[in-house]
Image: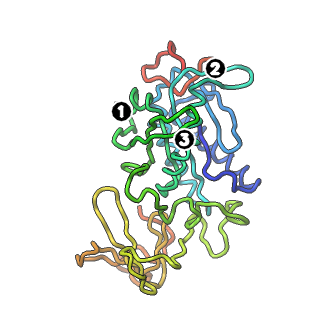
Amino acid sequence: MSVDTRESGSYLDGAKRRMRARIYDLAHASFAAAGVARSMLHLEDRGDGFIAAVDARIPPVRLLGTWLAEMHQRQRVGNEDLARRLGLRVGLHVGPVEHDEEGLSGHAMDLVCRLADSPVTRTVLDRSGRDLVLVVSASLHHEVVRHGGRFVEPSAYRSARVALKEGPVTAWFHVPGEARPRVPGDEGFDTLPVDASSGENGGGASTGAEAEGRPGPGKDAGHAAPDPAGRPAADGDPRVPGTEAWPVDTGSGAHWDIKVEGGTSVVQDRATFRGPVRFGSGGGADHEDWPTRGDRGLGGRGAGDDSAPNDSRSTGQDNGSTENPR
């Protein structure tokens, strides 16, 4: 296993200490929830993350399922209070691991570290607009992921070629919270979403208060509003002052156009829209207006609300055997 932090080099020293503490809190709580005792782990710190070998008696499906689900949910809750969200890249592979007094080594460790740190993995996380990406080796996908399991949905993984030092390999990507992640070759893959780690919505490099994990001037903790200045309308026409068409792809085939028309603001997922906000099909169909503060008596959410709607070690063996250490 390899766990690495998004854009860790832009953290100031104090913020990096707190970032590392968060990573270990997340990881150890998730290991405990997945039934992985600390005695069954060998962890080595990497400054902005860690590498780990997990006892061969732990089935890898438990790491792919319960452990990853716990990491995602705990990270999501923790990020709600951060002006700069913690982003993580996780790599998993199964294979033999050498262990001596100096630490871990072997081809399996080399491969999982290169996968987690690859430009493709970094870009998949950035283009997702989310905060966690999992990349697994082709062999782990073939032997475990494609068969499914508790919290493991094979259709939520997609493959892409990854160039490594030793040559190109096939890897499989999963972004928790998305039905299917975008990968190289997809239409629009080269376009960053407004809330990705480009810094446009609080996820990218920053200095001062934001690099310390505190809200910058004029920003609410946990929700940094994208700057709409200069962004064109969704249809490509010059934007009308005070009005913006914001396309949202739900990933399920549905499509909504969100009209943003001045006034107060609402927070939907991780993007902040200036209200009142009008939800419609974009083709003249019926629409629904997001209520403003004056509509609270109707039972709707206030437009100014800041909350969104509702020594053989390895990464695990699916048959529980200790005869084939990874």
Location of mark 3 (residue): 90
Location of mark 2 (residue): 98
Q: Nearer the viewer, residue 145 or 30?
A: 145
Does 11 appear above or below 194? above
Residue 162 percent coordinates (x, y): 49, 40
Q: Which residue is at a point 41% across and 51% down the rendered structure image? A: 182
Residue 71 percent coordinates (x, y): 53, 44
The amino acid at mark 1 is: Arg
Q: Judge left or right: residue 204 versus residue 288.
A: right
Sequence-first disc among 1 and 2: 2
Residue extending farthest right? 13
Does 177 appear above or below 148? below
Location of mark 1 (residue): 146
Q: Judge left or right: residue 188 versus residue 54.
A: left
Using the image, tell me which numbered label, if any, was put on residue 318: none
Name which quarter of the figure residue 246 lies in. bottom left
Mark 2: which secondary structure? strand
The amino acid at mark 2 is: Glu
How many numbered marks have been drawn onto this rendered protein structure? Answer: 3
Q: Nearer the viewer, residue 112 or 286?
A: 112
Disc 3 from disc 1: Cα separation? 18 Å
Residue 9 percent coordinates (x, y): 69, 52
Q: Residues within 10 Å of mark 2 (few under 14, many from 20)?
A: some
Disc 1 from disc 2: Cα separation? 28 Å
Sequence-first disc among 3 and 1: 3
Name which quarter of the figure residue 311 lies in. top right
Disc 2 from disc 3: Cα separation? 21 Å
Mark 3: which secondary structure? strand
Q: Which residue is at a point 39% across and 82% down the rendered structure image? A: 295
Sequence-first disc among 2 and 3: 3
Q: Nearer the viewer, residue 122 or 320?
A: 122
